[in-house]
Image (tube, helix red, strand yellow):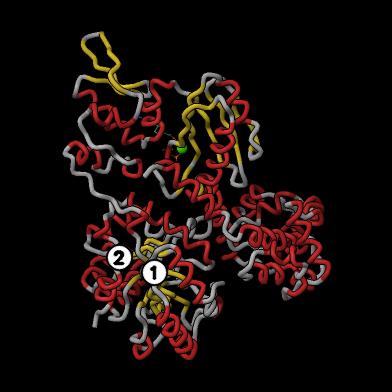
Amino acid sequence: MLARGKIILFLNLCDFGMKNQEVARIFRDTATMLELKGENPFRIRAYERAAQNIESLTDAIESYVAAGTLTTIAGIGKDLAAKIKEIIETGKLTYYQELKKEVPKGLVAMLEIPGLGPKTVKAIYDALKIDSVEKLEVAAKSGKLANIEGIREKTQENILKGIALVKQANMRIPLAFAASIADSFVEELKKNKYTGSIEVAGSLRRLKDTVRDVDILVTSEEPAKVMDTFVKNPLVERILAHGETKSSVIAGENNIQVDLRVVSKENFGSALMYFTGSKEFNIRMRSLALKRDCKISEYGVFKTSGKEEKWVAGKQEKDIFSFFNMEYITPELREDRGEIEAALKHELPHLLELKDIKGDFHVHSRYSDGTAQISEIAFAVQKRGYQYVGVCDHSRSLKIANGLSIKEVHQKKEEIQKINEKSNTRLLLGTEVEIDSQGKLDYPASVLKEFDLVVAAIHSGFKQSKAQLTRRMVKACENKYVNIIAHPTGKLWGVREAYDIDLDEVFKVAADCRVAMEINCHPQRVDLNDINAMRAKKNGVKISLGTDSHILDQLSIMELGVSTARRSWLTKEDVLNCMNLEELLKWLKKQ
Ligand code: DGT
Ligand code: CA
C-alpha cells in the first residue's frame, strides 16, 4: 500500500461537499469582516445564518443554482442568491474581497487564535491599535489588555496560550491537508513530459498524522524544465529557492513548504528511501550497512573493502531491502520502533488494510448534528461494502450539537428497526454519550441498555486535574453498557492540546472491562495517535476506527484511521472494524 493511491483519496476527502463548504466559508468570513468593521448586527447575523443553512444542505449548492431555486433555502433572499451565484461561477465574491481590503490584515490573523472572536479583536484594536499577533503577544505579556473593558486576567492568559497553539499548529499541518497540496503539485508535474518517475517522500509518505514540509522526488532528463513547472504552480505563494536540482516554495492556505528534488534514475530507490526517512530509521539502516561492510546513502548501497567502493543496489527500494536479506518495510513503519529487527527476522506484522474494514462505529445522523438521514447513511455504507454501521448521535446534555432526548432515542430506534428489515447492511442503534464531570453517563441504565452500541466521550470539563480526568474516564469504562471510548485524549489540531490523563491506567481498566479505544479518523483529531494506539494494544485493548462523519463524504476518511492503525503496527485481530457482523454482535454483548 503505497502513498500515491492514498493521496488521491485524501484529496477527495478534502473535496467533500466542496462548493457548499466553500460558499459557507466565504459567507462566514464576510460576517467576520462586517463584525470587525462594527457593522449592523442584523446583517452580520444574516450571513452567519445563511452559512449555517448552506452547510446543512444535503444537496450540492450547484444544483440550486442550476435550477434557479436558491431563494427556497431558508435565509437566502435575492441579494444572497446573487452572491452565491457569483461564488459558484467565479470561485470568489467581489463584495468579500473589497471588505477584506478595508480591514487590517493582522486582525484577520488574530482571529486564528482559539477563543478570540471578532468582537474582542475589534475591542483590542479600538483601544490599543493592536493590529498583529506579534503586538498582541507583547501586550498580553505586559498585562496591558486587562485595561480594556470586557477583558479579564484569564482572557489574557488564554490569549497567550492560544498564540502558542497557533504557532505550533503553523509549524506542522494535518496529513490530509498536506496530502492535498502535494497531490496538486504531483498532478501538475506529471503533465510535464520531462517528468520521469515521481514520488512523495518524507513524513507524508510515512503517513504521519502531521507534516512539517512536503518532499517530492523526480527523475528527469531536463531538470530545468521540470523546476519551471514546479515554481509556477498556482498554489505557490512564495519561491524560496529555484535551482537546477532543488527548488523550494511556500504554498497553499497553510503556507506549507514544498521541496522538489531531481535525483538520478539509477539511484531513485536509494534517494526515495533516504528522503522518506524517518531520520531515526535512516540512522539504523546506516549502522546495519556498516556491520555488513557496506555504506548506504541517498546515492545507493556500496560494498566497501579498504578504500574501494562498489555500487551494489539503489535503483528501487525493494532491491535495497533484498540486498540486506530483509522483508520490505512499508513506509508507515519506518520510525525505528523495532521494524528493522523484525524485517531481518522476516517477522513483520501483517498490517490491516482498508479492504479489511467491515464497518464504521462513529457516524452522526440528522437526529443530532449530522446532515444525512438514517436511510441515506444505510445506502452510503452499503455502497462502501460495509456489513454494519454505528449510527451514534449525541446525547441529551450536549444541547449545542442537538443531543437526543429519550423520546428521540425511541423514535430513532423505530426508524432503524424499519430500515434494518430491508437493508443488507446492519444499522446499529448507537449513541455518542456524554461522560459528565464525575464519570457518569448522560442516559440512565434503562435507556443505555436499549442501544446496540454505546460510544462514550468527553466534550466538556477538559481542564480538570489529571487525577480527576483519569478517574472520570476509568469510571466510564467500568460502566457495563460502554463499548467504545471516542477520541480518548481530546486533542484537536490548532484548537486544543491533548488533556492530561493517565492513559495506561485507563487502558488497563478498558482491557478488563472489554471496552475498545477509538482511533478517531478526523484529520484534525487522529486520536488515539500512533504512539497511544500502540500503548493500548500493549495493554490488551481493542481499537475501533470511527470517522465521526457529520456528512456522508466524510465516510472516506476511514482511510486516515487505517493509516494511523498501520503506523501503530495493528493487524486485523487488533481492530474491531475487521470483525464480521456476527463476531461483532457477540463482542458487543457484555451483559
Ligand atoms: P517532517 O518534515 O518534520 O514532517 O518530517 P520528515 O521526516 O519529512 O523530515 P524532513 O523533511 O526534515 O526530511 C525528510 C527525510 O530526509 C527524513 O525523513 C530523513 C531524511 N533526513 C533529513 N535529515 C536527515 C539527517 O540529518 N540524517 C538522516 N539520516 N536523514 C535525514
Ligand atoms: Ca518533510
Position of 459 with respect to 57 (left or right) is: left
Q: Is mark 1 within 8 Å of ligand 1?
A: no
- As measured in the structure, the alpha-carbon distance from the residue carrying label 1 to the one carrying label 2 is 9 Å
Position of 297 with respect to 224 (left or right) is: left
- Numbered badge on residue 518: none
Amino acid type indicated by mark 2: Leu
Residue at 33 percent across and 24 percent down: it is 314
Circle 1 — which element?
strand
Residue labelled with disc 1: 361
- Numbered badge on residue 576: 2
CA neighbours of label 2 inside 10 A, class few (<14), some (14 to 19), many (20+)? many
User: Which quarter holds ligand 1?
Assistant: top left
Q: Is residue 323 above or below residue 481?
A: above
Q: Position of residue 322 (x, y in %)?
A: 24, 30
Circle 2 — which element?
helix
Q: Are marks 1 and 2 in contact (CB under 8 Å)?
A: yes
Q: Is residue 249 above or below residue 427?
A: above
Amino acid type indicated by mark 1: Phe
Instruction: Report if residue 93 is visible in the image.
Output: yes
